[in-house]
Amino acid sequence: MNERGVPLFDAHLHLSDYPSPEEVVSLASWCGLGLLASSVDRVSSEKTLGLAQSHARSVLPFVGVHPSEAEKERDVSWLRGALEAATGLGEVGLDPKYSRVERGGAQLAVLESQLEQAQRAGKPVQVHSRGAETACLDVLGTFDLKSVLMHWFEGEDRLGTLADRGYFLSFGPALLYSKKLRRMASSCDRRMALTETDGPVAYAPLGGAHGPSLIPSVVFELARLWGTTFEEARRQVAENSLRYLYPGGKG
């Protein structure tokens, strides 16, 4: 919890992938950050749920099957029980890098099955859409989902669709050097923006830096792009995060 009373989050990282998740949680807590910990398969989902049990004040668990694992995890019946214990569904989506994303392929079938369960459970969703932004939005549009975060979204020409649907998008440390992401952050509705690190991804242009401690730098860059103070940007992102997590106003 941030000292000002409104929490700031790393809205997307893979806590279970760190050699020492406890150190990451400790540093994030010291920085006043909550962690939205995503998963990529059944094993990482179980690990993430375990970490959340051990760090209930700091870690909010998301469970699911990433598109890279769809061919190996076509049966997601286990997800029903996992979602009951989780904050939300993620990281799910489509990505042509791993396998076909069209109808008849494992990726689309697994994604639709997971979205059906998230819709039934009324849980927020985190979506991976690299190289398949339009396809992901088409699929999402067929569901009545409570809250959707487009993780590291790069569909610059589809920002209007996100805004019309009330979706969120997250900006990470790449915002500090990517002209495209800066354009997107400058032009998007500020009420859509969240911050993430996708840890343990390391950012070579930033000297290999990684992890939740980069979140304040992302907020500073948003403030610069928006022409606001750091505190104004921090509060906006914090409020956005709560609306994403608790669309019914429970946060």
Image (spheres, rainbow, N blue to C red):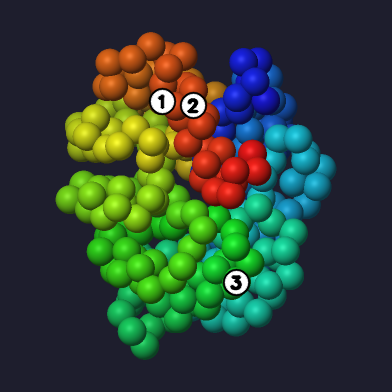
| Residue at the disc numbered 1 | 218
Viewer-proximal residue among 208 and 195: 195
Horizontally, residue 172 falls left or right of residue 246, namely left
Q: Residue at x 45, y 54 (%)?
A: 148
Position in image of residue 129 (x %, y %): 35, 59
**Residue sitting farthest toward the top:** 229
Horizontally, residue 44 falls left or right of residue 231, namely right
Position of 82 relative to 5 (above/below): below
Mark 3 lies on a secondary structure that is helix
- Residue 120 is marked as 3
Horizontally, residue 168 falls left or right of residue 5, namely left
Q: Do the residues labelled 3 and 1 touch (CB within 8 Å)?
A: no
Give the residue type that dot 1 points to: Val
Give the residue type that dot 3 points to: Arg
- The N terminus lies in quadrant: top right
Position in image of residue 81 (x %, y %): 73, 70
Mark 1 lies on a secondary structure that is helix
Horizontally, residue 241 falls left or right of residue 88, namely left
Mark 2 lies on a secondary structure that is helix
